[in-house]
Image: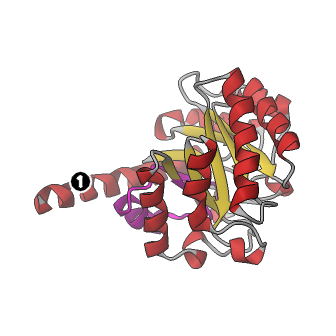
Amino acid sequence: MLLLISPDSVEEAIDCAKAAEYLDIVDVKKPDEGSLGANFPWVIREIRDVVPAGTPVSATVGDVPYKPGTVAQAALGAVVSGAAYIKVGLYGCATPTQAVDVMRGVVRAVKDHSPDALVVASGYADAHRIGCVNPLALPDIAARAGADAAMLDTAIKDGTRLLDHVPVDACEEFVRRAHDAGLLAALAGSVKAVDLAVLTRIGTDIVGVRGAVCDGGDRNAGRIRPELVAAFRAEMDRHAREHAATAAAAS
């Protein structure tokens, strides 16, 4: 399971760089513009410059409306700025057809420029609160559009978490559908260390966190700390070992 950490500034990205051995992806977003708020192109470039060359950078392009051309241009801007993972929050897409339309434009814009970049179709565990596509539709949307990964986050950051809105069996179904379609499955949304046993067991490929590695667990007022990143990674590794041992014993 890969660990994705989301700094909200170049200064926090420098702290992430200090903990680069414990994380796999540095994610650029702007939380004050939404769950998957897009940051400025120059911030993506600056963060790319301070993060070790071997650590990929991902970037969100926003909680996007149903405007395929606009979103495609935003995605191209993110990949040109140095992002290797391009995440699209399908906030304004009310139907799978609209979501596929948006994602196809993104995939073409990104892959025409950088074939090796990975495109992530991101939806929301609390979709029922904002009227966007059903979370379990995301793997099919991503596959039909030619994307590389499907992701769930939470749209409304009010203290509720991924598993408050999508129960474990539904998360497991999400991961299974993604894998059956040949996609990576990413899960985020106020994920904490206590959730790692479940996320490991169901086969999550990427786990995204912010609050869990910030002072006081506060994604807004807290700042990412390298020692908290290291501690979170240690818990991930522990659960991975325990899961492997259990699977070996069962076989």
Say whether residue 190 is visible: no
Quadrant placement of the C terminus: bottom left
Say which residue appears at 63% left-offset and 39% top-offset: 119
Left or right side of 145 for 227: left
Q: Residue 244: x percent and y percent?
A: 23, 53
Residue ID for mark 1: 244
Sort mark 1 into few (<14), some (14-19) or many (20+) by Cα contacts within 10 Å: some
Residue type at numbered disc 1: Ala
Q: Residue 157: x percent and y percent?
A: 74, 68
- Per the image, is 125 magenta? no
Left or right side of 240 for 127: right
Along the line of sight, the residue nearer the viewer: 185 or 38: 185
Say whether residue 189 is visible: yes
| Magenta highlight range | 186-211
Residue 71 figure quarter: top right
Where disc 1 sits, the SS reads: helix
Say which residue appears at 61% left-offset and 66% top-offset: 135
Q: Is residue 69 above or below residue 33?
A: above
Along the line of sight, the residue nearer the viewer: 67 or 201: 67
- Per the image, is 208 magenta? yes
Left or right side of 207 for 160: right
Say which residue appears at 56% left-offset and 56% top-offset: 140
Residue 126 figure quarter: bottom right
